[in-house]
Image (spheres, rainbow, N blue to C red):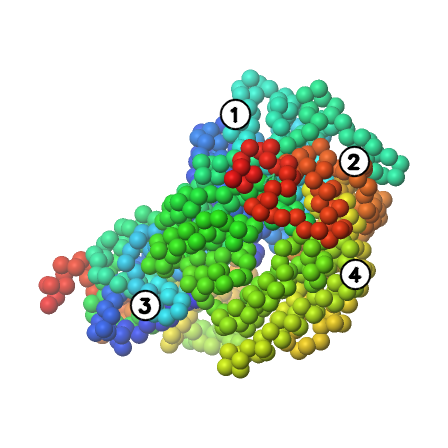
Amino acid sequence: MQNRIPDEILLQVEKPARYTGNEINMVRKDPKNVDIRFGFCFPDVYEIGMSHLGLQILYYFLNRREDTYCERVFAPWIDLEEKMRENNIPLFSIETQQDVKQFDFLGFTLQYEMSYTNVLNMLDLAGIPLFAKDRTEKDPIVVCGGSCAYNPEPLAEFVDFFYLGEGEVLYDEILDLYKQNKNERGTKADFLEKLLKFDSIYVPKYYDVAYKENGEIASFTPNHPHAKRMLQKAVVKDMDSVYYPQKQLVPLIDVVHDRVTLELFRGCIRGCRFCQAGFVYRPVREKRAETLLEQAKKLVAASGHEEISLISLSTSDFTCFPQLANGLLEEFTKQEVSISLPSLRIDAFSLDLMEKIQEVRKSSLTFAPEAGSQRLRDVINKNLTEEDILKGCELAFLGGWTRVKLYFMIGLPTETEEDLKAIAELCERIVEKYYELPKEKRPKPVQVTASSSCFVPKPFTPFQWDAQNTFDEFLQKAKTVKKHITKKQLKYNYHDAKLSSLEGVIARGDRKIAAVLYRAWQLGCKFDGWSDLFDYDKWMQAFEDTGINTAFYANRERSYDEILPWDHISVGVSKQFLMQERQKALQEQVTPNCREQCSYCGAKCFGGGVCYE
Amino acid sequence: MNKEAKQIDYTKKGFTKPKEHFIYRIKFTKGEEVKFIGHLDVMRLFQRAIKRAKLPVAFSQGFNPHQLLSFASPLTLGATSQGEYGDFEMAEKIEPKIIMTKLNETLPKGIQVLDSVLITKKTQSAMAAIEGAKYMVYADKQLTESLLKENLEKYIGQKEILIMKKTKNSEKLTDIKQDIFAIENKSRQGETKIYLYLAAGSKRNLKPEPVIESLYAFLGLAFYKYAIKYHRIELLRKTQEGDMVGLSEGIGVHDLSEIEKEI
Ligand code: SF4
């Protein structure tokens, strides 16, 4: 395969193998022999996209169809982009190295709001008009999915349709329909119209939005007789029988996560009130331990990876965890394959397990109390008590760990100065805990690092109505925490509030945000998630130029009867439930998790998972 | 995982250690398809290929065991090769050919094992053994066949060939003439090709690029670093008799049955 980019250019850019493919298990097809060419577009660099489980699954899922060739497309890093524009080289795919403009579909996965400018930039690099209305029959159909697609509105003007939910459910039907439409000489517009029969497909052009004078949405109405008033995400009911690839793309260069990934379950039983994933992926649906062991064996054999990572939102909640852990230990220790366990709660069981199966580096242990005081942890429904944390730390110290990392959020609803002070106090108590141990158990000085990120209210959470703190408030709060952190064993880091403020605007944005995105892109914004490239001033200029007020989106409390931009979408969890949860939050009441007691959130409607256990 | 396997001095290690390992020297290509991946990437790629091929590789002892692989001289990014080498330690004695066929079934395009030898004689590691390297250089359009033909003799006939050798904090004018074992015009059908045979290894090491750069300077041509392609033909070691041979030559057997013959 001839590389799309000439050697002379590749030699001058960082990590040229980002663009040349040829990985182990890369799918090779002759484009002439397929009916549908699908570009799986990841709006970030290769190393990040290749670490994304969704890409690995959908890539093989789509390619298992003989009539379809799914190829990967990544955002070229700025050094290559410059050369591409200089030399008029359009965006190309990894597999065939061909221009993506000729593809049938470009499917973008939206994992974080700060990648939206990259979506626009990739379309532009491909030579495709950015606005859906400007595209013609010759252009590919642009589809977006992924967790950010649950509020599709900020990108609605750029996208032909959004896929809401889990990809394995509907893509076969969609592609069949596309092929049929093509065979019947139907147009792209015909196809989009035919998509209206699906509950989980949102075609923005079939809906009109009207606004009130104050900027709120006055009405959101279908303008086509078949366009559904209410859309609902697509959900895999049975995780054991759903397609899961038996191989993985094994990159030839270093990427962020380079390992066998086992998806233990989807969803989360916990219902932390700030966490969007905890609501949009409901209900919890587990795989059986036998299924996972079988998948692990196949994936290790097909990849040659030396690490297996168990992926989920909260690994300790996996009901067959001991069985799985023992099975993996038995099978893989002799093969020198290590097992890593992100998202694990620290308790006696997990520490024991970590001793057994992880490369024990005793580097640092991580806790995520999210809030400093018990009061505020009750507000956010984070079921972790101070006792749990101190007990976990004690066990960790006894096990030889001397470094502890704690993650907090600042700017949570109802937060007071007391809550911020409590962050420092909790950290101090952990240090004290260490010094309560007998001297011989304290080989090294203890080090506790607290990090705080800025809370961003997200759609489909109980805090979707809440005002986000302003940039200045965040800064003030970070200073308050810092003031109280005095012990020399404590360190405090806080995240850039600028990025979170902007994320706060886009996350709950409506269609009007499109103008800002477009303007920001024109001004040169891209890779906004990369702190060295993020240019806050340009964004502020984009807001100014388009007359969009950030405070309206980020720092305003909405009333319950306001029409929210994502109200036409259901993730199963009812709006009623979210309201109820918000009221409970204000009353500092916790809600039991799905396994303790069902709270009738609405996700039972999908007919599977934990709701029927 | 990515740690470079440590260098092994086989003269010390030998075959007499209590835990017997069998060391195979592997010769392989690095083709167009993989020319932009680095030295560590090649190592990781082989570790995984060995795992997929289920070869009985030997692991280091200790907390974080890794496969005992070591590789010879790294190739510059963008260059291709038909003469790359690695030493792989196996925990079992298997037919050298099996290693070759099994790896070739699973290696990515562009990497192909050309030779596999079980080391039976005292020898240095692939890295330590190198004394010479042969290259084919594909020049850019400026350097025409005739220009090269007319001037190559003059270039190599200079009393000394001086280049600026850059070290960490200084630049030094160095004579490289004695490190050029051979330089020949191999141009064909309008493609200007230069064959280079250079000193390589830990004692004396000359990369092809500075040679071509000095040749261009000698000819008064502008040197565009990225316009020239390099292909490594072979890495060589010196035998006890003083002959230069490929790294996998004369150090062991291709077939286990040859071992008995040797004894
Ligand atoms: S319906 Fe009940 S069990 Fe099911 S996700 Fe909602 S709260 Fe959990």
Quick check: can you spot residue B183? Answer: no
Quick check: can you spot residue A589? Answer: yes
Q: Estimate the spatial distance between the alpha carbons at disc 2 and disc 1, rounded to whole Å.
A: 35 Å
Amino acid on which disc 4 is placed: Thr
Question: Which is in the foreground here, disc 3 or disc 4?
Answer: 4
Q: Estimate the spatial distance between the alpha carbons at disc 3 and disc 4, rounded to whole Å.
A: 66 Å
Q: Are marks 3 and 1 in contact (CB under 8 Å)?
A: no
Q: Are the residues under marks 4 and 1 on the same chain? A: yes
Q: Estimate the spatial distance between the alpha carbons at disc 4 and disc 1, rounded to whole Å.
A: 55 Å
Q: Estimate the spatial distance between the alpha carbons at disc 4 and disc 2, rounded to whole Å.
A: 30 Å
Instruction: Give the camera-side residue of B224 and A567.
Output: A567
First in sequence: mark 2 vs mark 1: 1
Q: Chain of mark 1?
A: A
Judging by the rendered image, the residue that carries numbered circle 1 is A176
Question: Which is in the foreground here, disc 3 or disc 1?
Answer: 1
Judging by the rendered image, the residue that carries numbered circle 2 is A563
Q: Is mark 3 within 8 Å of ligand 1?
A: no
Amino acid on which disc 1 is placed: Asp
Q: Are marks 2 and 3 in contact (CB under 8 Å)?
A: no
Furthest toward the top, the residue is: A184
Instruction: Name the residue rendered at 42%, 70% in the picture.
Output: B206
Question: Which is in the foreground here, disc 2 or disc 1?
Answer: 2
Furthest toward the front, the residue is: A597
Q: Estimate the spatial distance between the alpha carbons at disc 2 and disc 3, rounded to whole Å.
A: 71 Å
Q: Are the residues under marks 4 and 2 on the same chain? A: yes
Amino acid on which disc 3 is placed: Ala
First in sequence: mark 4 vs mark 2: 4
Instruction: Give the camera-side residue of B177 and B53.
Output: B53
Judging by the rendered image, the residue that carries numbered circle 3 is B126
Secondary structure under tag 2 reads: loop
Q: Are marks 4 and 1 in contact (CB under 8 Å)?
A: no
